[in-house]
């Protein structure tokens, strides 16, 4: 196998290395987009097809970042945040789909997942180790309400019923991008693939007769897995309190998964992994379950067909949904 290294830049998305097979082989592509690492592994019969497929997936991630990042002033989402309180704002099919799915998960979880949490989320700066005062938090919380986000499918528009709402799609947009990436790989004739973006993973088929081996990280160790799972043809999303965090003056962990009810980091759970058919659903549900906690989270998951969960709580206990069997001896 010969390896060709190329550097291609599309804004935030950068193709790092493509392994080009001289014959049918596994191909690995890695890059960065949406502020996270993108990694692909897929079986290809044709080196030219492999190159085009990898390029197309990373370019798609960059397009979605341009549409859905709240950190870009020129993104569609930023325009919605600026204008939707004044009237309906027409958006792309992609953004509309993500907003629809986000509101569906908000309803399922009774607001534990709420994309309007951006109204308090922007008050946190994890790099600078800053969090809002009680007064700032109270002001922001008054604007957190997914029911104030109104979609019109006939016109592809979104509007806000209240001033000051800020949407943040950080808990669902990467899952949508992973699903679209798998669609792109399929369009190139690829039938076995693994595509991940941060904590969101989608497996297409198996690993040529064997299952893919997926590790669930120990939330308190960067180098150790809490467990490994043999999986095929499934979406897997993990939300953890170790992804973005700092310790405050009281040595308490301040992490990025905020409760829409309090505006503060959700308590009681260290890690949530959701398994399902598509990444946009597992991405949103992993956040929702983290906020709900183990008992209420499992209650919700056990009512959903085709969805399973593995939860590691703050006592390091592991909880499984009804569709999963705990390992022997656990």
Image: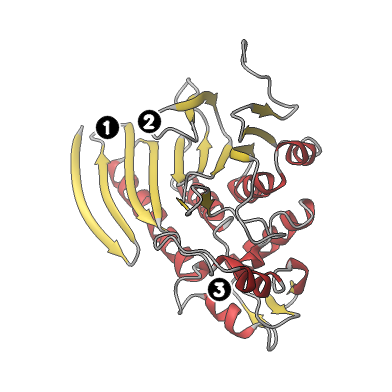
Near mark 2 (Cα within 10 A), the count class, few <14, some 14-19 or many ≥20, is: few
Q: Which residue is mark 1?
A: 23
User: What number is the disc on residue 276?
Assistant: none
Q: Nearer the viewer, mark 3 or mark 2?
A: 2
- Residue tagged 2: 223
In this orientation, which residue lies closer to the viewer: 22 or 133?
133
Q: CA distance from mark 3 to mark 1?
A: 43 Å
Residue at 61% from the left image edge and 10% from the top image edge: 329
Q: What is the total number of numbered labels drawn onto the structure image?
A: 3
Picture residue at 71% right of the left edge, 37% below the top: 294
How far across and how far down the image is residue 115, in percent? 64, 63
3 or 1: tag closer to the N-terminus:
1
| Chain-order first, disc 3 or disc 2 | 3
Dot 2: what SS?
loop
Q: Which residue is mark 3?
A: 77
SS class, disc 1: loop
Mark 3 or 1, closer to the camera: 3
């Amino acid at each position: 196998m010969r390896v060709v290294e190329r550097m291609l830049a599309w804004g935030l998305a950068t193709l790092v290395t493509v392994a080009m097979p001289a014959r049918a082989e596994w191909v690995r592509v890695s890059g960065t987009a949406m502020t996270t690492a993108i990694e692909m592994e897929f079986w290809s019969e044709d080196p030219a097809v492999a190159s085009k497929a990898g390029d197309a997936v990373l370019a798609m991630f960059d397009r979605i970042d341009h549409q859905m990042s709240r950190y870009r002033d020129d993104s569609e989402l930023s325009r919605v945040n600026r204008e939707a309180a004044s009237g309906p704002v027409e958006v792309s099919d992609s953004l509309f789909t993500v907003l629809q799915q986000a509101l569906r998960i908000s309803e399922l979880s009774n607001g534990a997942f709420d994309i309007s949490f951006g109204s308090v989320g922007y008050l946190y700066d994890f790099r600078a180790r800053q969090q809002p005062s009680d007064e700032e938090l109270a002001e922001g919380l008054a604007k957190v309400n997914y029911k104030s986000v109104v979609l019109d499918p006939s016109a592809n528009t979104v509007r806000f019923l209240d001033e000051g709402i800020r949407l943040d799609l950080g808990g669902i947009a990467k899952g949508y991008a992973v699903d679209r990436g798998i669609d792109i790989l399929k369009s190139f004739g690829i039938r076995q693939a693994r595509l991940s973006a941060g904590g969101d993973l989608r497996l297409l088929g198996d690993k040529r007769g064997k299952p893919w081996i997926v590790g669930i990280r120990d939330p308190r160790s960067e180098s150790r897995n809490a467990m490994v799972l043999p999986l095929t043809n499934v979406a897997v999303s993990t939300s953890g309190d170790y992804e973005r965090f700092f310790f405050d003056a009281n040595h308490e962990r301040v992490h990025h998964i905020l409760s829409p009810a309090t505006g503060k980091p959700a308590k009681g759970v260290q890690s949530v992994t959701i398994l399902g058919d598509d990444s946009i659903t597992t991405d949103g549900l992993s956040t929702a379950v983290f906020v709900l906690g183990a008992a209420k989270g499992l209650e919700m998951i056990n009512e959903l067909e085709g969805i399973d969960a593995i939860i590691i709580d703050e006592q390091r206990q592991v909880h499984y949904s009804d569709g999963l069997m705990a390992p022997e001896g656990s």
